[in-house]
Image (cartoon, grey):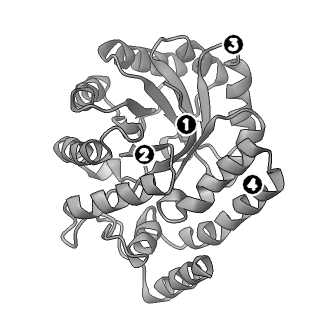
């Protein structure tokens, strides 16, 4: 399985009562696929995985997997703090038909590098489908060392890492140290999509592509065609959205923007609250910019 291109870190649509919204989910899935994404990544940070029960995660994954219907790969987040719980959820997602799993490093209590290696190897042994490691140190309190990633890259079904450290040098170290392995490195920082591609990343898992899908996809497509100037222009276009995203807690601004663009994804789940009126005005200005 090749992990490449622009893969959307999809938001989880809710209704106004903060329950799963099947209709909005199907709307968003089809918009993303029709806009050319290379895959759909659910139950990540922007998918509010930390606020859903395991039963909700399974129910949501079923809606997405059924609606995608093998048109693109579906990557499902199953990470957590307990190795046993991650294995249990991972087996359920494998049975549902997930193409691959995304597993964030444990958080709250920061494990050692050797403990993380044991954690990932135990999960990999428990399932047959591919696993993508998810490194997001600002949220978890730990950064995976390059040597740790190399050891995990040698495991048959651990095939890639999503790095959301925001540091290009981190991505570069992962690419260099795993160069002799059948292993992919993806940017999880939307600001670094093109820079990461230039140094050997195979793609990006991008939250901004929930909204500005065509722009994100064009970065990758232009890069492949050798149109670096065009890719750089598209990369800069993302910044208008990214500037507004900083005005609220993840993923409140992004969900409001997608909602205002016509797809019913609803609010973020509490304790994250809806953007205030002055922020909604900024979101509208941003949407107007992209609709010109």
The reply, left or right, for residue 130 in relation to residue 52 is right
Decide which of tag 1 and tag 2 comes sooner along the chain.
2
Q: Residue at x 49, y 30 (%)?
A: 133
Q: Residue at x 44, y 16 (%)?
A: 157
Of badges 1 and 4, the one in the foreground is: 4
Q: Residue at x 31, y 65 (%)?
A: 271
Residue denoted by label 1 = 162
Residue 146 sits in which quadrant? top right
The reply, left or right, for residue 37 in relation to residue 51 is right
Give the spatial CA distance, label 3 vs label 2: 27 Å
Give the spatial CA distance, label 4 vs label 2: 22 Å
Of badges 3 and 1, the one in the foreground is: 3
- Residue 143 x/y as whole percent: 58, 33
Decide which of tag 3 and tag 2 comes sooner along the chain.
2
Residue denoted by label 3 = 180
Residue denoted by label 4 = 231
Of badges 3 and 2, the one in the foreground is: 2
Decide which of tag 3 and tag 1 comes sooner along the chain.
1
**Figure check: 249 above or below 88:** below
- Residue 247 x/y as whole percent: 54, 73
The reply, left or right, for residue 54 in relation to residue 45 is left
- Determine which of the numbered discs, if any, sits on residue 269 in the image: none
- Residue 221 x/y as whole percent: 66, 48
Give the spatial CA distance, label 1 vs label 2: 13 Å
Tell me the SS state at disc 3. loop
Decide which of tag 1 and tag 4 comes sooner along the chain.
1
Give the spatial CA distance, label 4 vs label 3: 28 Å
Do we see residue 19 in this rendering?
A: yes
Tell me the SS state at disc 4. helix
Give the spatial CA distance, label 3 vs label 1: 18 Å
Residue denoted by label 2 = 40
């Amino acid at each position: 399985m090749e992990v490449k291109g622009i893969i959307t870190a999809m938001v989880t649509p809710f209704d106004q009562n903060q329950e799963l919204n099947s209709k909005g989910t199907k709307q968003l899935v089809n918009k993303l696929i029709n806009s050319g994404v290379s895959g759909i990544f659910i139950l990540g940070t922007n998918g509010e995985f930390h606020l859903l029960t395991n039963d909700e995660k399974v129910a949501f994954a079923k809606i997405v997997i059924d609606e995608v219907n093998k048109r693109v790969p579906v990557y499902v987040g199953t990470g957590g703090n307990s190795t046993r719980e991650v294995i249990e959820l991972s087996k359920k997602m494998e049975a549902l038909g997930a193409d691959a799993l995304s597993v964030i490093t444990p958080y709250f209590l920061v494990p050692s590098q050797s403990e993380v290696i044991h954690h990932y190897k135990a999960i990999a042994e428990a399932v047959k489908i591919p696993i993508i490691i998810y490194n997001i140190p600002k949220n978890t309190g730990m950064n995976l060392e390059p040597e740790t990633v190399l050891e995990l890259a040698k495991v048959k079904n651990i095939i890639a890492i999503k790095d959301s450290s925001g540091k290009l040098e981190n991505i570069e170290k992962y690419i260099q140290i795993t160069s002799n392995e059948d292993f992919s490195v993806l940017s999880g920082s939307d600001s670094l999509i093109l820079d990461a591609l230039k140094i050997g990343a195979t793609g990006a898992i991008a939250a901004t592509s929930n909204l500005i899908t065509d722009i994100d996809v064009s970065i990758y497509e232009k890069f492949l065609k050798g149109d670096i100037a065009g890719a750089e222009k598209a990369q800069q276009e993302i910044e208008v959205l990214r500037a507004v995203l900083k005005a609220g807690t993840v993923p409140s601004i992004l969900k409001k923007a997608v909602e205002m663009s016509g797809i019913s994804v609803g609010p973020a789940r509490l304790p994250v609250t809806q953007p205030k009126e002055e922020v909604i005005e900024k979101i509208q200005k941003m949407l107007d910019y992209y609709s010109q």
